[in-house]
Image (tube, rainbow, N blue to C red):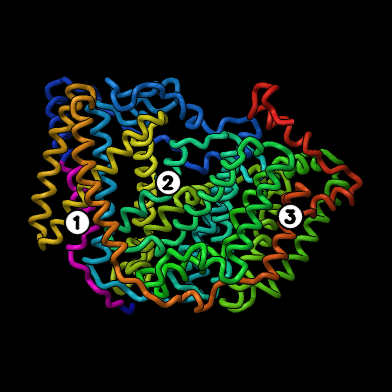
Amino acid sequence: MEYYHHQVHAFDEVGTTFAFITFGAAFMIWIIMSVKNRSHRHNGSQQQGRNYEPVDTSEESEMLHQARDGEPDSDRERHRGDHKGDIVEGKGARIQNSAKSNVPEKTAKIEPVTCTFDSILLLMNYLSQFGGILIYSWFCENRPLFDHANKHYSRDIFWFITLVYAAFALTTIKSNKDTSILNRDQTEEWKGWMQFLFLIYHYFHAKEVYNSIRVFISCYVWMTGFGNFSFFYIKRDFGFVRFWQMMWRLNFLVFWLIMVHGNTFILYYINPLHTFYFLMVYAAMYIFSSCNHDKYPVRWKLMVLALVIFFVWDVPGVFQIVWGFLSSNPIIGATNGTLHEWHFRSGLDHYSAVFGMAFALNHPMASAWLKATEKLPMKTQWLMKGFVICVIGVIMSVWISQVFMLPKFEYNDHHPYLFWIPLTSYIFLRNCTLTLRSYHLSLLTKMGKITLETYLMQHHIWLTTNAKSLLVFIPNSPLCNFFFVSLLYLLISHRLFRLTVGLRAMLIPPDTNAAQILLAAMVTTLSSIYGVAKIVCTVNGGPAVVILVTAAIGVTGYYLLNIIIREGSTQSIKNAYLISTGCIGGVVIICSLVEWILAPTANANNDHIGGVAVNIGLGIMILIVFSLGVLSMDSYHGITVAGSLLGWQEYPTWEEAYSNLHHKIFPSKNSAPV
């Protein structure tokens, strides 16, 4: 095992100090409250403790097919909007009745934070766990037990581990309740097997599967378009709460990793990609939202969006004008500058999300075609399906031989315009029979639920040095070390998922006013603590000073929270607290902006370096393919329409496919689109 010589960072970066003070203070408050709670319990004044589980309201549970089939997204989603009480001023913690929710007797679902002892104690507990994991990641990077190791690729070991994982996954087959196209279990399974290969590719630096990884990333971005279009189409919820929930889910963990490790947003490039394309979907669906459910206007909106993407990414020079505010300075994660790195990363997937949006829009047509086809005699059914499979097979054969086998950089030039071929082929083949749609591999679905956490934490607690080297707990035993480190990494990633979702449930209540008040409190508090951390680092305060400051903030925080708990309200301190922390935080934010503006910038435009896919000809080609799919209302770009013609069957009409869905979206007949 060869060892990687890395630079050790001192515990003096502002971001690291900021994170330590923030979560250290939360830990201190939790300790004090726990001791007090134990004392009260010893005196018989406390109820029996409960185990809490966060409400899983992740965006993955809001796929379009679930609403289209008339099924609630989940039991959790059904109760999501039912909390009508005052979140900030609540007099007591609301615990859902376990008899009604079929949860174990001592288990309660997490609800928005209230001015009660139990609620605040739980919040401090979750913040302490989250902060502990962040500090652990810092020690893995900067104070490891053993030197980090270099990556080493062995094709035999790589494929052996992959085959073992696949074989074990096959033993976890389970049936689905939902058998629609791209049902939730299936999409989680899809993300799960892609994520496994994505991670193991990074661990072993398996360059020979690079082209496959590019396809997987496009699939993830495609799902961002598919899932969020589905939500906005069904729920028609463009409110602050939904927006803030998505921003939290996508960026809460990465924000703190940036702080702790002194990294940049672009280093964790998956997060900027998903954030940007979520914003794109949000804007596209919000603008002229009244026409989202009409037959053709929404399709014209998607075509205009695709045209805008074409001009920005495929016409030379336009990207630099639109994104010219990005820096060309070399930074961590972007040695040629943020502008070039963002052009490269976003350029590889600039059509992925809009294709996902189009598939979501056509989803009722694809479902109606499949249902109608499977009611036909077996001979006719397989004549139509067989035709589609044969066409897909021919196209895939050409794509594999002429595109997929190209060297890395040549493949990148073609990938943004042809990624849809393997993607839509997989979707059709995975859903072409009822049997295939009725089962999923449970192991893969579990992996699929924690893709964001496993992606982010691989940089620091599985791999290290921002994914350039390997974490070592068992030196000179690479396979044993791989097993132990991987096990710990997966357990931590799963816990981080629960913590992130749980904190979101506590700090983003469904009431817009309460959510905005809590957001203001978080911003002013964190800005003030950041200012304190900046001062500590400016005066070269060592670990002892950081600990003293953390203790002072912790004690102050406990004192303020004790007042809130005692009075059951924030009224007595809310205004004074927001004004004082707001003034301090405002000064910190202004000073940080001035510092950023005055920072030296590079005069050179590094975006000419190359490696970015810009091709007007291929851009026009993909616009034609996209338009064919959108206007024909065929998710497979006209292939299933041709299959219907071959079987002498009529393709489903828009009215047939969408009528039931629209009546569920618009319960009043007068409000349903015509």
Magenta stretch, residue numbers: 4-28
**Residue at point 37%, 34% (across, down):** 515
Is residue 23 in view?
Answer: no
Which image quarter: residue 150?
A: bottom left
x%, y% of residue 557? 16, 38
Which image quarter: residue 330?
A: bottom left
Identify the residue under disc 2.
247
Left or right of 438: which side holds 527?
A: left
x%, y% of residue 651? 83, 43
Please tell me how crowded label 3 is: few (under 14), some (14-19), or many (20+) other residues with Cα within 10 Å: some
Amino acid at pointer 3: Ser
Label 1, label 3: how far apart the Cα atoms are: 52 Å
Amino acid at pointer 2: Met
Identify the residue under disc 1.
17
**Residue at point 39%, 23% (across, down):** 96
Please tell me how crowded label 2 is: few (under 14), some (14-19), or many (20+) other residues with Cα within 10 Å: some
Q: Do the residues labelled 1 and 3 touch (CB within 8 Å)?
A: no
